[in-house]
Image (cartoon, rainbow, N blue to C red):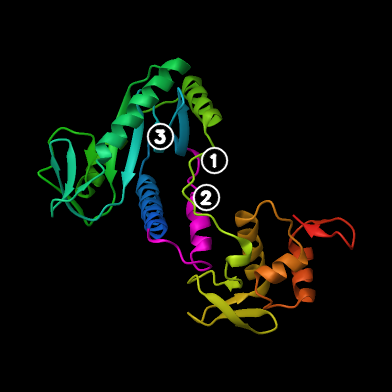
Amino acid sequence: MILKERTKPEELVILQSLQPRMELEEKDAQYLWTLEKGYEGEVQFDQWFTNHRVESLIINDLLLEVNGTLFQIDSFVITQDRLHLFEVKNLEGDYYLDGDKFKTAAGKETKNPLHQLSRAESLLKQLLKELGFYIPLEPHLVFINPEFALLQAPLKSPIVLPNQLNRFMDKMNRTSSKLNSKHTKLAEALLSLHITKSPYSKVPGYDFELLRKGVICGECGGFCEFHSKSKFICSHCGHTGNIDTAVVRTVKEFQLLFPEFKVTTQTIFDWSGGILSKKTLRRILKDNLTYIGDFNRRYYE
């Protein structure tokens, strides 16, 4: 049973919203690519993990803190006599381990994901001890991308390579599991400690006046420049979308980027680049959001 579904990280959503509206610096564009790649791999992991058949509790995307130190867990699985900690990587290409260094086939050193897994394992064990749970914890480093290879992979390690995924799942499914209230209490304790918003944001600064205005296509991320009475047509990919849906999506994007601003007909008119009349926007806002205030101070939530 999945107790906490995976959601797209807020930083990723914000950067994806900013990308068509401003010129991202190289480091920000690289960070966006890293977040997209990571999330893509985690979604692939979730699809693979649907093959898990035994009784378990699954918690995705946990952000926890121990003694002032934050750590993230991609997936945490509670079974009868084992806790499974999963770190998921979506790397491509050939890599190898040189001692405790993790390198590409070309010899370029990158962050060693084993260190990240070890850190999360150590901190999680501390937390479990503080909570009074002493169920054995098994860490797993899953390389989900089929185009990844680890040359001269060690025989005994927490690493699960792409060509080992099916066998790993078969082994998990052969282990019987019957949960009780102890397991539920552990899951509830961890969920109660989950930090919903990371204090360490890498999103660049941005300003309403300096961002490009318009309605963004939900398919390709380009700007919609033409519309009929009820449809938007993307001039980049040709996708046709419902005006109401596009405007609601644009409002949600505005609320995400500017949570301190009130949603009014004028602000959404400006944000959408004047592509729709205020009359049309007012009707869409009234139909899809909650109307607050009188005529002169009207805004929507």
Q: Answer whether residue 216 is visible to the viewer in this image.
A: yes
Q: Distance between the residues labelled 3 and 2?
A: 20 Å
> In the image, is residue 166 part of the stretch drawn in magenta?
no
The mark closer to the camera, 3 or 2, is: 2
The residue to which callout 2 is attached is 10
Q: What residue type is labelled 3?
A: Phe
Q: Name the image quarter holding residue 34.
A: bottom left
State the mark number for residue 105: none
Q: Nearer the viewer, residue 92 or 183?
A: 92
Q: Nearer the viewer, residue 247 or 263?
A: 263
State the mark number for residue 197: 1
- On the rendered structure, is 266 left or right of 5? right
The span picked out in magenta is 1-26
- On the rendered structure, is 101 left or right of 54? left
Mark positioned earlier in the residue sequence (3 or 2)? 2
Q: Distance between the residues labelled 2 and 1?
A: 8 Å
Q: Which amino acid does label 2 sit on?
A: Glu
> In the image, is residue 4 part of the stretch drawn in magenta?
yes
Count neighbours of disc 3 (C-alpha within 10 A) and say few if under 14, some if 14 to 19, many if 20 or more: many
Q: Assign a secondary structure to mark 3.
A: strand
The location of residue 108, given as percent across then percent down, is 17, 51
- On the rendered structure, is 82 left or right of 100? right
The location of residue 162, given as percent across then percent down, is 23, 49
Q: Answer whether residue 80 is visible to the viewer in this image.
A: no
Mark positioned earlier in the residue sequence (1 or 3)? 3
Residue found 38% across the figure and 25% down from its top: 123
The residue to which callout 3 is attached is 76
The location of residue 71, given as percent across then percent down, is 41, 33
Residues at discs 2 and 1 in contact (Cβ within 8 Å): yes
Q: What residue type is labelled 1?
A: Lys
Q: In this view, does 32 lie above or below 183?
A: below
